Amino acid sequence: MSDVVQSVLAGIDGVRGWQEALYKDLHQHPELPHQEHRTAAKVADRLRTSGCEVHEGMGGTGVVGILRNGDGPRILLRADMDALPVREATGLAYASTHVTDEGTPVMHACGHDMHVTALLGATDLLAASRQQWSGTLISLFQPAEEVGDGAQGMVDDGLREVLGGVDVAMAQHVLPLPAGQIGTCPGPFLSAADSMRITVHGRGSHGSMPQASVDPVVLAAMIVIRLQTVVAREVAPAETAVLTVGSVQAGSRSNVIPDHATLLLNVRTYDEQVRMHVLEAIERIVRAECAASGSPKDPEFELYDRYSLTDNDEATTALVAAAFADHFGERAVRIPKHSASEDFSDLPNAFGAPYTYWGIGGIDPDAYRVAEAAGRIAQDIPTNHSAVFAPVIQPTLDTGTSALVVAALAHLGRG
């Protein structure tokens, strides 16, 4: 471990107390996308305490803290703040019981509270050690990652004008891996994602007179079956794609043939050409099945909740991975690409900046080892978005805080 990293991280014992208290507080008070007002206020207060120049209300509830410390690169570190409409079932003493005014339960089921707390701690440590580095540290707290428009919302709200420029951007996410472990992946890491709403039209009729109908239920069923061939027969075996039909809705009574059906699809890809081919194949198949069924109206297509590919810059990832190996030793590993999706890349892409995005483990190491030995990781280890997903506070928090410091110092100049 370099002397500079060691010197900055010497202060981690001094931030751990308030970090753990803040993490529990954020976990107990989760907020849905675009509603992160309480979280943003706490973030802004802590950034001011660390001596940052603070910009609030970006993209709605986004917060940016800037530490200008002489000449050097402009490094952006990002954490997401929003929670999910999930009823928590962890049984923790600090579990969320929050329910919105509309009756929706809310939970930090994806670890964003851990991301926020780790970045605030890293910012505080770097602010207290300015003599050890030079450059500009940008700590960005993003809203609405879960709906895929929070990053772009901050860009559209003037982020480029506020920051001027970014030389490299970095982010991390807690994953269902052993706590204390940290994993990097060069190149494509998180998939691009596209959700699609398709409405197909038929002709309604009484259930006893099907000859008078064009049945959209049968039409939707044929579409679902035919879509299974897109990945199996139109995507090369060396490529990766996922096409999921998550919802089919039509009619409300057993003896009434409805006049339309709605399908909700989700597509995951790691290559832009594959992405476009799959989306085009879906439309081609749907239109053909509608024609085959004699549908009286053209189908309707709506794309929503779209996420860009997270494609880690090779050189940036190699530099960070080497720094992690130096600091974390055997706990720093290489992990495979994941089929989850993120909108983080919209931030560096807006600046034309290279970026890297890594994962940190959040599962109790002993519990993980037991599940691994029994071959029951999939059954016994909760994943993100589960009602029982909650990272163990330590060593997850120390690892996440240290990782951000180490990665930042791998780029910032020496004081």
Image (cartoon, rainbow, N blue to C red):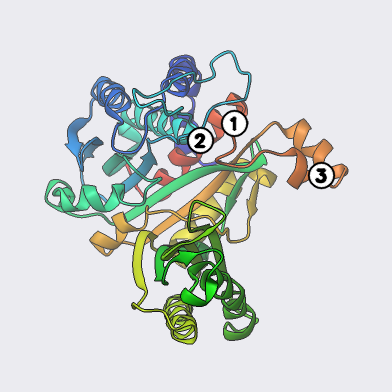
Q: In terms of image quadrants, where is residue 390?
A: top right
Residue 232 x %, y % = 64, 79
Say which label, 3 or 2, has the lower sequence index. 2
Q: Which residue is mark 3?
A: 376
Assign a secondary structure to mark 1.
Answer: loop
Give me the disc on residue 391.
1
Identity of the amino acid at label 3? Arg
Looking at the picture, tell me which residue is in the foreground, 367 or 195.
Answer: 195
Q: Quadrant of the C terminus?
A: top left
Please indicate whether residue 287 sits to the left or right of residue 328 in the image: left
Identity of the amino acid at label 1? Pro
Q: Residues within 10 Å of mark 1 (few under 14, many from 20)?
A: many
Please indicate whether residue 173 sits to the left or right of residue 145 in the image: right
Q: Are marks 2 and 1 in contact (CB under 8 Å)?
A: yes
Say which label, 2 or 1, has the lower sequence index. 2
Residue 211 x %, y % = 52, 77
Assign a secondary structure to mark 2.
Answer: loop
